[in-house]
Amino acid sequence: MRTVHPSIIIGSYVWDPDRVPRDEFQIRIGGLHRVMDANGWKAVLVYGDAAEHSALAWFTAFTTRLRWGMALIPREGEPRLLISMSSRDVPAMKLMTWIADVVSGWNWESAFDPWLARIAGEGPIDIGSIGFELMRPPLFASLRKSLGDRFRLHAADDAVAAMRTVRPRERSQISAASRLVQTAAASFIEPWRLGVGVETAALTAERTARMAGAQDVRTLMSFDGGRTLAPFRGAFAPQADRQTPLAGYVAVKHMGYWADVFVTGLRTMSSPHMHAQAGLRALLDLAKPGAAACDLHAAATRELGAYALHPVLSGSVGRRIGLSLNEGGELKAGSRETLAPGEIYSLHVGVCDSQAGGALTSAMIAVTTTGSEIIHLSPAPNVL
Amino acid sequence: MGAPKVRLEATVRYLETEALNGLVAVNYGHNSFLESHAVFVLAGVRPIGESAVVVDRSGASTLIVTPAWDADRVAAVSQTSRTVGTDDLPAALTSVLAAHGLDGRKTVTVGLATLAHSLAGRIESALGGNSHANDLLIRQLARIRSFEEIAAAETATAIAERGYAHMLACVRPGMREYELAAELYCAMKGLGAEDNFLLLSASQHNLAVRAAGSRVLDEGDVILSEITPCYQGQFAQLCRTTVIAKPTSVMQDKYALLQAAMRAGQQAAVPGAAVRDVTAAMDACFRAAGYGDYCRPPYMRVRGHGLGITSDLPGDLTADSDARLEKGMVFVMHPNQYIPETGYLMCGEPVVITDAGAKALSARAANLDSVAV
């Protein structure tokens, strides 16, 4: 789900070497070295910004709270991490990564050019890049100027995505995030059940997650019975409209990993909710290695009957989730993706009807070698 | 008439003066408290994703928002003539330009440099590749806050002060930094803060403020907080220093330096004053106390800065800034400083420029606060 990106990510992102030790990153960098060798690249530059930094975090543990960060990872030698923060902030940023060489990128020429000069070889020298489509034009121009004619950039996104499997430690972290989002979901529904307004309920969920160490929390809520979702607006209706169903969304980032869930509260089970749940069941039944994204989409939407897929899902019934809320692999009508063992998906199904209202439900699953395991489901609709 | 309407009209006058047919202002879907949000300035609303506003010389305007499903919410409050929802901003922009009868090559753009370069490239293509960029335009139009914007900034400041009071009431040794940050953040959100650039950290000797970590608060810790709620698009920032124990006399003496620097900055910040002179007035307090060598990074960053998302002007308060202050500008002034004897200390208020100098929006000026153990 698209949610409002905050002005800064405020949670605790100090690198925890007990949970993800240096040797884990050596394994990941080793995989990157193999990609470099296969392509003849002397280095890979991994870019991330505050909104999307999945690859950067995977290789460095560093989460970009603000502006941008870029890991300069050579085939030979030590990596450097450039951060778009002042020199005053470098000591704090060093706590967020296993990389020792952390430098402010605000003076580009002194931060990047000397590192680049260490790469030996006759030009043109090939270098891989990740995430560069996200880079702002002025920074991209500076980078191009530094590379000049001696270096050639090659997009490494696909090659690196192919070698990036969900590792056991990651699976453990995702499970922890899942537990936290389930706790937050319960904290969303319970206040509403007791009669408070939807924004107060959403804020209760957020507070619960943050007090438990969530690094980021995103919520969306419906003010019209699930027909649309909206971000926080601060109106805080004192009491819930008990005639109107509760529809909300909460996503929690914990130990670097996202988990998300839709929550529902109803007076009585309605036709839209039964259809949405049927669609989700169809997805869960079919989710296994080799299942085609377009077939999953078709199976889910078939169960919706006369209802249309909810507009807030933007035509998708799921996607991979992990270090980013959207790791790709959209389950859409025209998608060519297939599910693979080890992947983690967030499945979203919903319908919207102008008369009957809207309904949204979700699950997170891990694709196994033979099928899939449910990590969590939306809480059963809380019928008053 | 609200501020967005006034700025849309000013945009039309600019187009006439510059003999341009239209304006395309974009935002990348973030609310940077250090940057101007051109779409918010013109439309009065913050879309969830990437967005654009198109204005033509007749005064007609269209807001384009992503994702498409956010359009109804945004249309209800947008000050533009029309709102369009899309999941493909460049494609929708092409259609909107045609609907306005605009040739993209005779438009001025604002904010393309803030987009991801792949998206910026697609938008430049939609504009025909020869548009004229003026990234200062909206920042200039919005540099003086309107009456309603100052009122919103005052509310944001009041939220920050109530949040800080809540923090003082609940902080205790044994809490983790992130728990205290959660208390503070959620208390302010409960008061209506839609966003918050919140930094909060503690140490027995701080080098700088940073985001909250998992450190357990202890007796003798100095808590630094940069409390920055946003209310109706107006960020306001308090910089505060809190000691978990009775502050030492050295700490009190050194904190008084920051307070003196703050007062000096406020007095110097009259309409027409150069930002460099205001900065120098603050720095002079530290130099006189023998800390001249520390009036530079990494011992401090800047002496204050503009506050998004309306306009980031007057920019950073630095010794080399050529900017000049104007009546009605709102920004944060903060002579935060590393002092060798005490570590980093913070003292800062949101201010509005008046004829008498920089008037703090906060009801209580920063003190060296303490929490009894």
Image (tube, rainbow, N blue to C red):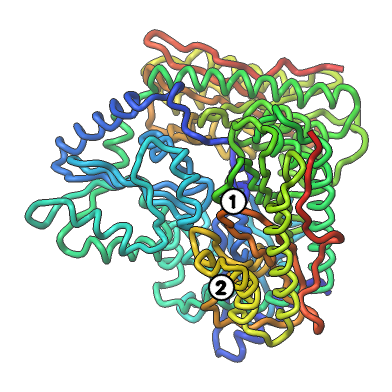
Q: Nearer the viewer, residue B128 or A138?
A: A138
B313 above or below A3?
below
Helix, strand or loop at label 1? It is strand
Q: Amino acid at mark 1?
A: Gly
- Tag 1 subunit: B
A211 horizontally vs A143: left or right: right
Q: Amino acid at mark 2?
A: Thr
Q: Residue furthest left?
A: A122
* Pointer 1 residue: B343
Quarter of the rendering occupied by the C terminus of chain B: top right
B325 above or below B234?
below
- Tag 2 subunit: B
Quarter of the rendering occupied by the N terminus of chain B: bottom right
Do labels 2 and 1 touch, CB within 8 Å?
no
Callout 1 crowding tier (Cα within 10 Å): few <14, some 14–19, many ≥20:
some
Which of the two labelled residues, at mark 2 and mark 1, occupies the earlier sequence position? 2
Q: Is residue B98 visible?
A: no
Q: How many marks?
A: 2
Q: Which mark is residue B318?
A: 2
Q: Nearer the viewer, residue A39 or B56?
A: A39
Q: Nearer the viewer, residue A379 or A30?
A: A30
**Residue A55 rendering spot, x and y as whole percentages:** 39, 38
